[in-house]
Image: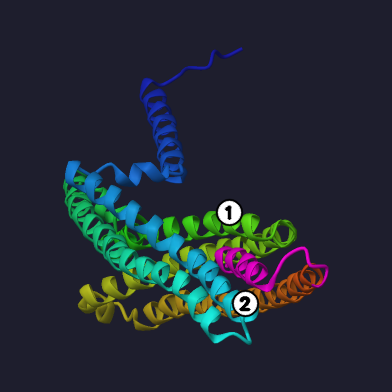
């Protein structure tokens, strides 16, 4: 029997291949790893945290204004209903409600300024540092990375589109999220105080609306990410073709470039069709469930008022606070 001989160079090559595969797996795991939301705020300094605290306060106050407005509207309508034949009593009852409307107006104005201004300003400050860190990370890469993974299209997409998405996430949209959060929970509290029967029924209906809305947003976010990927590939193809236009003409590669670009565009068109379908179906389902919920809750509210367990001035804010807060 002949004894198998091993070449040291072959062993070194096999070892290098195994190491490269392990490095690629590690890079893929890092790339696919989901970054926690608080990591987006890593570039915030003391002033940014102060601005975010002020923006949070403004968002909460601004969000609570809507349910409180419905509550005051219900009180005003109840003042008309209880004193429909007595003008003086109606005016006296409205005098008790109107000052609170003024107070809410004066509180909402600075709250809105804080909500939008602080969140937008701090997001711009953090994004400036983030872009600088992105540039430093690019400059620290090896030269070979720019020929394989870091194409011009991906770099431009990362600087423009991805940074814009991050700015929206830590800026104005975060303020709107906190405002909507405050609107919902203050609406639930006001509805429970005004008419607990209607509030209890509404809490059973709202999760269905939330599930439809969450599913719709999840589908749209997935499609947006896929569209951005194909758009980045198309931009890379177009930029490489224009940059190497002489080489393309020399090797008669016009048709190949057109086919590659058309393939990316066809994929994007297909995804756009799915986006249109999902957007239409999602919007229709959301509106259908919302109007059906309105009909059911108003009917229950009418039953409660007819049984003299509550009045219209309490049922109206209970219905509107939760439904508009959930939507």
Q: 10 Å neighbourhood of mark 1: few (<14), some, or many (≥20)?
A: some
Give the percent coordinates (x, y) of residue 197: 75, 59
Give the percent coordinates (x, y) of residue 88: 52, 83
- Compared across the picture, whether 86 is left or right of 65 comes to right
Give the percent coordinates (x, y) of residue 115: 31, 61
Q: Residue at x 39, y 62 (%)?
A: 62
In what quadrant of the picture does the C terminus appear? bottom right
Q: Is residue 326 magenta?
A: yes
Element type where label 2 sits in the image: helix
Residue that mark 1 sits on:
189
Q: Which mark is residue 283?
A: 2
Which mark is in front, 2 or 1? 1
> Which of the two residues, 51 or 61, is positioned nearer the viewer here?
61
Magenta stretch: helix, strand or loop mostly:
helix
> Which of the two residues, 157 or 111, is positioned nearer the viewer here?
111
- Compared across the picture, whether 106 is left or right of 324 comes to left
- Compared across the picture, whether 150 is left or right of 327 comes to left
> Label 2 to label 1, Cα distance in Å?
28 Å
Up/down of 326 relative to 249, above or below: above
Element type where label 1 sits in the image: helix
Q: Residue at x 56, y 71 (%)?
A: 75
| Magenta part of the chain | 306-327
Q: Which mark is residue 59?
A: none
């Amino acid at each position: 029997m002949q004894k198998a001989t091993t070449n040291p160079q072959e062993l070194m090559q096999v070892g290098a291949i195994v190491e490269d595969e392990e490095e690629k797996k590690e890079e893929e795991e890092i790339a696919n790893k989901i970054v926690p939301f608080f990591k987006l705020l890593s570039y915030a300094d003391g002033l940014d945290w102060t601005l975010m605290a002020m923006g949070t306060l403004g968002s909460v106050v601004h969000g609570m204004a809507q349910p409180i407005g419905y509550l005051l509207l219900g009180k005003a309508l109840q003042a008309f209903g209880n004193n429909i034949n007595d003008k003086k009593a109606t005016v006296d009852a409205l005098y008790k409600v109107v000052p609170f409307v003024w107070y809410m107006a004066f509180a909402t104005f600075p709250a809105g300024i804080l909500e939008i201004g602080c969140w937008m300003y701090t997001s711009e400050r953090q994004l400036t540092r983030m872009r600088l860190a992105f540039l430093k990370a690019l400059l620290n890469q090896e030269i070979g990375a720019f020929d394989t993974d870091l194409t011009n299209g991906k770099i431009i997409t990362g600087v423009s589109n991805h940074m814009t998405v991050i700015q929206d996430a830590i800026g104005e949209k975060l303020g709107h999220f906190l405002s909507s959060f405050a609107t919902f929970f203050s609406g639930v509290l006001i509805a429970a105080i005004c008419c607990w029967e209607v509030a209890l029924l509404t809490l059973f209906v709202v999760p269905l609306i939330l599930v439809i809305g969450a599913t719709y947003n999840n589908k749209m976010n997935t499609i947006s990410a896929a569209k951005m990927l194909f758009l980045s590939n198309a931009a890379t193809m177009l930029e490489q073709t224009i940059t190497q236009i002489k080489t393309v003409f020399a090797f008669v590669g016009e048709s190949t470039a057109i086919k590659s670009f058309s393939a990316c565009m066809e994929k994007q068109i297909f995804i756009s069709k799915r986006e249109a379908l999902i957007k239409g179906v999602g919007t229709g389902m959301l509106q259908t469930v919302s109007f059906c919920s309105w009909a059911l809750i108003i009917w229950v509210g009418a039953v409660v008022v007819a049984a003299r367990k509550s009045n219209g001035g309490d049922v109206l804010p209970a219905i509107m606070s939760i439904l508009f807060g959930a939507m």
